[in-house]
Image (tube, rainbow, N blue to C red):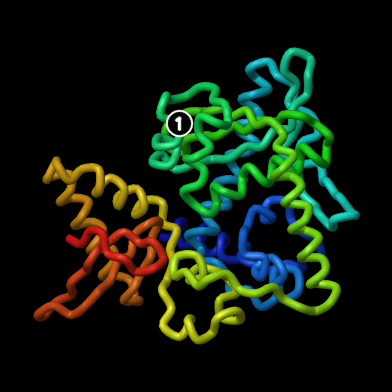
Amino acid sequence: MNNIVEAVYENSKKKIKSYPCHANRASQLGEDCERKLVYMRTRWEEAQPHDVSLQRVFDQGNIEEPAIIREVQDAGFDVIEQQVALSWPEHQITGHIDGLVRIDGKLYPLEIKSMSPHIFGSTFTRGPGMYEWEEVREKFDRYDWLKKYKPQLTLYLLLKEYEEGLFIFKDKSSGALAQVNLPLDYEEGEKLLQRADRINEHVKNGTVPDPVPFNDKKCGRCAFNHICCPDKAENPIKFIDDALIIEALALREQAEEHRQIYNDCDKKIKEWAKAQDEDKLVCGDWLLQKSPHGKGVRVEIERFDGEMKKEDVS
């Protein structure tokens, strides 16, 4: 019998490619490492490819987006200009807006994102519903990928000349939805344009910015670390975006008072880690390190802050 799952994953692997990047992508300008943004423009073909687990995350996002738009439309809202290409030649910025949604006769730029249950639940603590940006602002400072969402929509607001836009977030497990209203932040918008202009100057002159201070968590998973800091990449950590393991790690932390749940998660995580080839793995916010232990292998689990600071080891 043919292995369907294996065939699906092989098909996902075929989508892992590097493409020429001739402009500043709005979805990436929230990145605070300008050297990386220059490399994305000038050395894109040398980027280290992401793994198939992360590609599957991207694939699911592409599936979720049109499904959520259909739900919004079915609820009686017009969504126009879906996936329209945007361009700001003066600053060499490009992007694709998910759509414009009409609410009470007024149009708002719309961005749709999906989240793991843990991230969704810890961000939208009141549950499904509508939130103002200030309610959740600090929650979006926790992870690098979440930090890029506001800058992306801010640039779309500037490009489309709108004063307010909104996000729709979906819990990938439960289907719960949350709306976040985002007013245009002119100060942040100006900083993003200045960043784009600095990058353009480096590209034009063939130069690169100074590197940011090295951080294992951030630099270790950068696709250009072998170019930017090759000496630090000699003993690399493998970064894995495995949603099931990230959820188990989060549940393991939350369930320490419930020993059976804790032990079940702990066992699942360590068995998974032992099956990996690398001795050091980072999954989500956790560092898993393997070492010989008698006739077997010991797995230590700790919080990972990029500086190898141990907070909790089982």
How many discs appear? 1
Question: Based on the displayed image, in which of its 4 quarters is residue 107 positioned?
Answer: top right
Q: Secondary structure at mark 1?
A: loop
Measured as percent of width and height from the top left, residue 164 is found at 72, 29
For the point 80% across and 52% down, which residue is it? 94
**Residue 311 placement (x, y as % from top left):** 26, 59
Spot occupied by residue 50 in the image (x, y as percentages of width and height): 55, 67
Q: Please name whichever residue, 50 or 258, is drawn nearer the observer in this view of the structure.
A: 258
Q: Quadrant of residue 181?
A: top right
Q: Determine crowd level at label 1: few under 14, some 14-19, many 20+ residues with C-alpha closer than 10 A.
A: many
Pick the quarter of the image with the C terminus. Answer: bottom left
Q: Is 122 on the left-hand or right-hand side of 261?
A: right
Residue pictured at 74% horizontal, 13% vertical = 104
Relative to the observer, which residue lies in front, 36 or 76? Answer: 36
Quadrant that contains the N terminus:
bottom left
Return the residue found at the far left: 294
Q: Mark 1 = which residue? A: 124
Q: Residue at (54%, 40%) from the top-left corner? A: 114
Horizontal side of residue 78 vs 62, given as left or right: right
Which amino acid type is shown beneath numbered disc 1? Phe
Q: Quadrant of residue 78?
A: top right
User: On the picture, is 263 further left or further right than 105?
Assistant: left
For the question of whether residue 2 can be seen, the reply is no
Rendered residue at 22%/68% (across/down): 299
Q: Is residue 261 above or below residue 298?
A: above
